[in-house]
Amino acid sequence: MVKSKISKKSILFTGILLLFLSGAIIFVFYNGNLPEAPKGNLPETPKNLDRIKKQGKITMITDNNAVSYYIYRDAPMGFEYELAKEFADYLDVELEIITPGWGSMFESLNKGKGDFIASGLTITDEREKFLLFSRQYMAIQQKFIHHKLKFGIKNLSQLAGKTIHVRDETSYQERLEELKESGIDIDIRLLPNTATDEIIRMVSEKEINYTIADSNIALLNRRYYPEIKIGMSIQEEESLGWAVKKDDQELCEQINLFFKKAEETGILRKIYEKYYGRMEVFDYFDLKKFHERITTRLPKYKEIIIRESKKYEFDWRMIAAVVYQESHFNARAESHTGVLGLMQVTKITAKQMGIENRLEPEQSLKAGIKYLDILYKRFTEIDNHHQRLLFALASYNVGYGHIRDAQKIAEAQGLDKNKWTSMKQILPLLSKHQYYKKTKYGYARGREPVKYIENILIYYDILKQKTNDLSLAQ
């Protein structure tokens, strides 16, 4: 009996509750208080291109190396950098640059840390699965690289049994793995976070036997490492392109329009010629020519060199050695980086030193020697005049910032940071990722200033001996 009564009460209570809830829902509905679905006129997330133009800047993701982007004589350089700067100007925005490292570029793009990747990136089927590529701006081929004292290959089957070192996560790795799967027994050694430039250096110095490099990278580096041989292609022609996020169609279209314009106006050709147009190795170490030019070329500029050197208490013979190293006493000399004249003055330095014509001998000498004095005065912590001058000369060659980076590394390794012998040991490390990734100014071809100083000191020694000849005395 008790159970029956409880059951009836429960049923009655449940019915009243349902009736109450139904009325509440009807009341809310007719009073217009029911939440509505979002309407199309609500604010949308701004598109990437709109954001770029509104902020007035675009961020390039690249790698810190001799091909893409580096600092030379305190100014940014690199094929990809200069092309990207033109693109930023095309959009009428500022260019910002980040160098997260090769292995982190894709992640940086997807996390929104940058807007596009410009780093000599080969367009491959695998990469197109997660990236949107622009049209091609350069055609390249993968080349087999070996030391000139080693035999190359005449066909792909001769790759069998060879140990080939390449950077990981590259199109080189993909291609070698394809060849291995086809039945060619290749020993593939992957080098993480090691620039192809550095691997080419390793081949040049016989640390490893072989590597693979894109044709443009190989040709550029042959200038610095003449001991290498560029062998046969191991892949059909491929294309380089810039990459954006998979859904960033609008920015990709702008890049394509820019590339079309750059081709039509000659901008692309001009930048290409600057970096890849002249691949011959300039011979700075021909002593026979130096002896000859002491008498045929130096007399034209000797008076100006002596006068300007005295202003800053430099030995004119040392300055003359610098002039020869820079230009071979050729007033119209122009390097592949665009520096001009007897002292190979950059546009930035010319403006800072107040000269207008870098090809005019007196202006070039005045600007170059004055700038060398400015660099000299920055190393106030070095008491020895000769040591201090070597640091200033190295800064003139590779950039003041890189010398300061090298000093920090030297100090961390327990070396005397104010001795040139320490710099000779440390500067070459600036081309290695494990070292330059921790520096302020990044990648540098650190062997160049070492060779630069060696050459100048040899020329200086010869000039000191030659000044016994009255024709060269002050």
Image (cartoon, grey):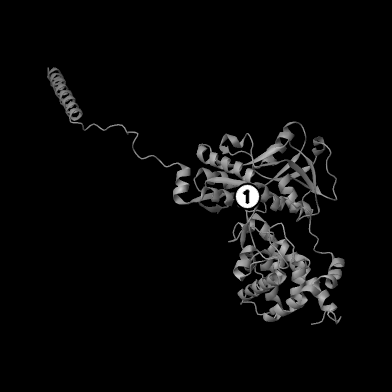
Amino acid on which the number 1 mark rests in the picture: Glu
Residue 42 location, quadrant: top left
Can the viewer see residue 394? yes
The residue indicated by pointer 1 is: 80
Where residue 288 appears, x then y in whole percent?
Answer: 87, 67
The quadrant the C terminus occupies is bottom right
The quadrant the N terminus occupies is top left
Can the viewer see residue 416? no
Residue at horizontal 74 percent and vertical 62 percent from the top: 333
Q: Is residue 65 above or below residue 3?
A: below
Where residue 315 appears, x then y in whole percent?
Answer: 74, 79
Report the front residue among 179 and 58: 58
Q: Is residue 71 above or below residue 21?
A: below
Q: Is residue 432 above or below residue 296?
A: above
Report the front residue among 241 and 214: 241
Residue at horizontal 44 percent and vertical 49 percent from the top: 54
Residue at horizontal 54 percent and vertical 39 percent from the top: 253
Residue at horizontal 62 percent and vertical 52 percent from the top: 82
Total numbered badges shown on the rendered structure: 1
Q: What is the crowding at mark 1: few (fewer than 14 residues within 10 Å), some, or many (at least 20)?
A: many
Q: On the rendered structure, is 187 left or right of 116? A: right
Where residue 160 appears, x then y in whole percent?
Answer: 80, 37
Report the front residue among 238 and 192: 238
Where residue 13 appears, x then y in whole percent?
Answer: 14, 23
Q: On the rendered structure, is 329 left or right of 95? A: right
Q: Is residue 288 above or below residue 252?
A: below
Q: Secondary structure at mark 1?
A: helix
Residue 260 location, quadrant: top right
